[in-house]
Image (cartoon, rainbow, N blue to C red):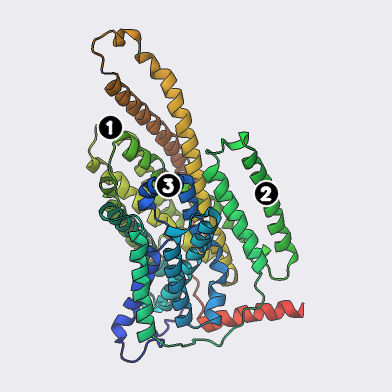
Amino acid sequence: MSGTARPMSFSMPMFRRFVPERIRPWIYVFFAVTFQFSGGLYLGTLNQMEGETALMREDLLMCLYANLAGMAVYFPLLFRMKFRFTNKTLLCASATGVLLCNLAAPHVTFLPLLWLVCFLEGICKIQGTFECMSNIQLWMSPARDFTVFFPILHIVILGSMQLSDLLATYLMYYYRWDYMQLCICGGMMVDLLILTVCTRHFRMVKKFPLYGIDWLGALLWAALLLQVAYLFDYGDWYDWWNSPVVRRLAVAIGIIIALCLWRMLTVRHPYLEPKMWTYRHLWPIFILITLVEVFLATEHVLEEVFCEEVMRYAETVSVRLDWLALSGILAGCLFAYWWMHVKRFSYLRLLATGLAVLACYLSGFYFTLSADIHLSQLYLPVLFRGFAYAVLSATFMVCLEEIMTFQHFFQALSVFNMLHMVVGGVMGAALYSQGLSYCVADNLLRYGASVERVAYSRAPFPLEEYMESFVSRIMEVSLKQIYGWVLYACLFLFLLFLLYDAPIRRELKPMPSWRKIRTLIAGSFAIRKRE
């Protein structure tokens, strides 16, 4: 942190006097974790849901993307809500919204309505998490240093993702898949009880009205994000461009893009301002986070295919890998904190380090993947994956904050998370699914000659066992091929980082106070009115 930044005093006056000062921030950490545990539907329960409901896997994954889209699109409104409502009001509303959405999700069968429920749950989830973490930011870093805040934030976010998957899997195994929703509802009821008893309505700044918000622009960007997710999620099901549905959807996406750009360029205060797109280094960050998410999508496609189709692991066996991913996430966040805050090394070299560890993860699976291995042989590659994901996510957010003014930071953060949470992952999943289908068919043709009449001449011939082993080996070879190509792409990107070695910043700029942020927002609207 540069010498111009002053440490600020930390207090939490929204708590009642009988609540001890020392436990107040920890209560908000607990709230943030419970919000991050929540979701409309849960990845750990997809297999049982697919078997017990009339929904396809694509339908269930679309619920996940709708939830993430709600989180990503809502970022520009977070501070506006903070300056309009009290902290208690926002947290109670968020907890109530998560509670109602989790109660409704298991019983909704109409897909568009289910996607809407998951979308609204994502909005409540990010609003609750933001309220909690923004109020304890000074507790984590008295100087509002983002090189401290973002690594700790990602411990909460990414760690909660892994623990949520573990909890959902074990609840599904011992009870039913909808017990996870009931567990989250119980957590939200605890949050509401603590908020009702221990907190009061308190404003840190003067109330700021909700005027000047481009609600139609927000709906257009949300519609665009959901359409892109739908295209890549259902593309393989509809056979891509051979289907009129996909062709019509592509035309609709083009129309929505045109409407978003038209509104952005013509409205006085659009949801995403044109100036936000003009910052130096912004587009490279957007492109890089998308590519990284495409690489990391191997977790949800190739790893799952290997564990389920090749190794035949039960959910409770393959979910053990989440503990290694959690360990990697903790190590990665602490390493990013040490690199950026303690040693103050170059951010670009930290990104290169993250990419190098990501390449270790891909090469680990490429050289280890086999039907003859033990699960423990995957521990180290999964640990690398968690480490790389934590390092890259935290560093990209710090870089994004450092290259932008605070006026446009949350708008850029919205686009960043659209790519980070939705677009990169769904594109990578579609790419790997399509590539795996091609490689399996190609390898069946190449190696099918081994199943010939001489082999059949033995009596009795164990055809069923032979074909099961044969198909398993074909799947194994195909997975290795995909991992190899992804490894090549990751190494190529890593070499580009080595060729271009220059830090984005050497000195961190100070983070303004809440009052100054409110004044800046109010001043921007006053200037626009005079214009």
Name the spot of residue 385 as percent of width and height, x first. 35, 49
- Taking the image as shown, residue 499 lies to the left or right of residue 140, namely right
- Taking the image as shown, residue 66 lies to the left or right of residue 30, namely right
Residue 500, visible in the rendered structure: no
- Quadrant into which the N terminus falls: bottom left
Dot 1 or dot 2, earlier in sequence = 2
Secondary element under disc 2, as helix, strand or loop, is helix
Residue drawn at x 34%, y 75% is: 190
State the image quarter where residue 103 is shown: bottom left
Query: Considering only vertical position in the picture, is 382 above or below 219?
Result: above
Q: Which mark is residue 371?
A: 1
In this figure, what is the number of numbered marks?
Answer: 3
Name the spot of residue 518 as percent of width and height, x first. 57, 81
Type of the residue with mark 3 = Leu
Name the residue furthest bottom.
17
Type of the residue with mark 2 = Ala
Query: Considering only vertical position in the picture, is 281 above or below 215?
Result: above
The residue identified by callout 3 is 296
State the image quarter where residue 360 is shown: top left
Q: Nearer the viewer, mark 1 or mark 2?
A: 2
Q: Residues within 10 Å of mark 3 (few under 14, many from 20)?
A: many
Q: Residues within 10 Å of mark 1 (few under 14, many from 20)?
A: some
The residue identified by callout 2 is 252
- Give how far apart the Cα atoms at labels 3 and 1 are: 22 Å
Residue drawn at x 73%, y 70% is: 268
Query: Considering only vertical position in the picture, is 336 above or below 301?
Result: below
Type of the residue with mark 1 = Ala
